[in-house]
Image (cartoon, rainbow, N blue to C red):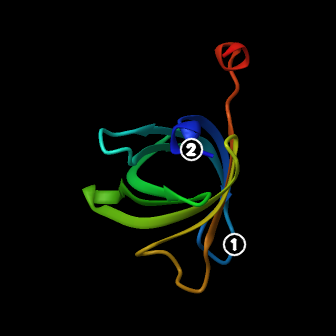
Amino acid sequence: MTIEALVGKYTIIGQNQNAEKSPYKGTLSLSLDSYKRIKAEWLINNEQLQWGVGVYKDRILVINFHYKGDHGAIYNGVVVYKCLTENILEGFWFEEHGDPEYLGQEQGIKTITTNTLFN
């Protein structure tokens, strides 16, 4: 699998990094920069924008991500995805202010469009 095959939009579901494992859903868009690093942008629950840059090797995608929290503070974290196929991601994540006793979890399925089907 190549890094180019991962480019696209994914529907995601996940659980937050807390004892309650609060569920969330959203979208993840992956693209490449000029150095063939992954650029990622999440939209969580149609309200929270997150962004990051990562690398891919041997079916593992690692992304350092950021988002703006309350009062404009920027929060940072890391997500690690196992690329089961070019269309299915399975991952875990943590952020600096999350509960250190837990990991967040996230799964992504690539959105298939008519163009994708006929390419």
**Quadrant of the snapshot with the C terminus:** top right
20 relative to 62, above or below: below
Which of the numbered marks, if any, corresponds to residue 2? 2
Characterize the local packing of mark 2: few (<14), some (14-19) or many (20 or more) Cα atoms within 10 angstroms: few
Q: Report helix, strand or loop for mark 2.
A: loop
Q: Which residue occupies 50% across, 56% down?
A: 56
61 relative to 49, above or below: below
- Marks 1 and 2, Cα distance to the nearest angstrom? 36 Å
Tell me, yes or no, whether the two marked residues, 1 and 2, touch with CB atoms within 8 Å: no
Where in the figure is residue 2, as x and y percent of width and height?
56, 44
Where in the figure is residue 55, as x and y percent of width and height?
44, 56
Describe residue 89's horizontal placement relative to residue 52 as left or right: right
Front one among 60 and 58: 58
Q: Which residue occupies 59% across, 71% down?
A: 17
Q: Which residue occupies 46% across, 66% down?
A: 78
Front one among 51 and 37: 37
* Residue type pointed to by label 1: Glu
Q: Report helix, strand or loop for mark 1.
A: loop
Q: Which residue occupies 70% across, 40% down?
A: 87
76 relative to 59, above or below: below
Check disc 1 and report the residue beneath it.
20
Characterize the local packing of mark 1: few (<14), some (14-19) or many (20 or more) Cα atoms within 10 angstroms: few
